[in-house]
């Protein structure tokens, strides 16, 4: 590894260093922390209003509640 690569890696580690995700996600520090958001980007197929999403979740809940109430244990 050449010296430029080493310097880049050192600088990169100082930006993305250990504990950065914890600072952001659990401590709410958006300045010193690191927020990782790319892992699920491929699952987003369209953007919906929050009200629509909540309504869909509620409707699914109602259907599952009805289905579960009909189960015989």
Image: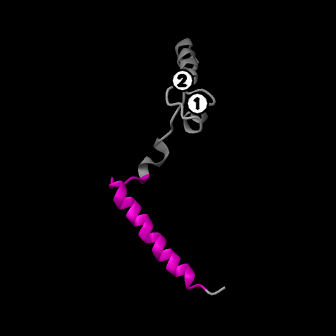
Quarter where residue 9 is shown: top right
The residue segment tinted magenta is 43-71
Q: Nearer the viewer, mark 1 or mark 2?
A: 1
Q: Nearer the viewer, residue 58 or 48?
A: 58
Secondary structure under tag 2 reads helix
Would you name the residue on which mark 1 appears?
Answer: 20
Q: Is residue 31 magenta?
A: no
Identified at 36% across, 55% down, the residue is: 50
Q: Is residue 54 magenta?
A: yes
Identified at 45% across, 70% down, the residue is: 60
Residue 31 coordinates in the image, percent (x, y): 50, 26
Quarter where residue 56 is shown: bottom left
Q: Main secondary structure of the magenta part?
A: helix
Would you name the residue on which mark 2 appears?
Answer: 15
| Local crowd size for mark 1, using a 10 Å CA cut-off: few (<14), some (14–19), many (≥20) | many
Residue 20 coordinates in the image, percent (x, y): 58, 30
Contact, mark 1 vs mark 2 (Cβ under 8 Å):
yes
Quarter where residue 73 is shown: bottom right
Secondary structure under tag 1 reads helix
Q: Which numbered disc flags the more N-terminal residue, 1 or 2? A: 2
Identified at 54% across, 18% down, the residue is: 11
User: In 3D space, how far apart are the residues under numbered discs 1 and 2 (Cα atoms)?
Assistant: 8 Å
Residue 72 sits above or below residue 3 on the image: below
| Local crowd size for mark 2, using a 10 Å CA cut-off: few (<14), some (14–19), many (≥20) | few
């Amino acid at each position: 590894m050449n010296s430029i690569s080493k310097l880049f890696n050192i600088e990169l580690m100082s930006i993305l260093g250990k504990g950065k995700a914890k600072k952001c996600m659990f401590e709410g520090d958006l300045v010193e922390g690191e927020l990782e958001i790319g892992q699920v980007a491929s699952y987003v197929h369209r953007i919906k209003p929050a009200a629509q999403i909540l309504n869909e979740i509620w409707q699914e809940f109602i259907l599952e509640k009805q289905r579960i109430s009909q189960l015989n244990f």
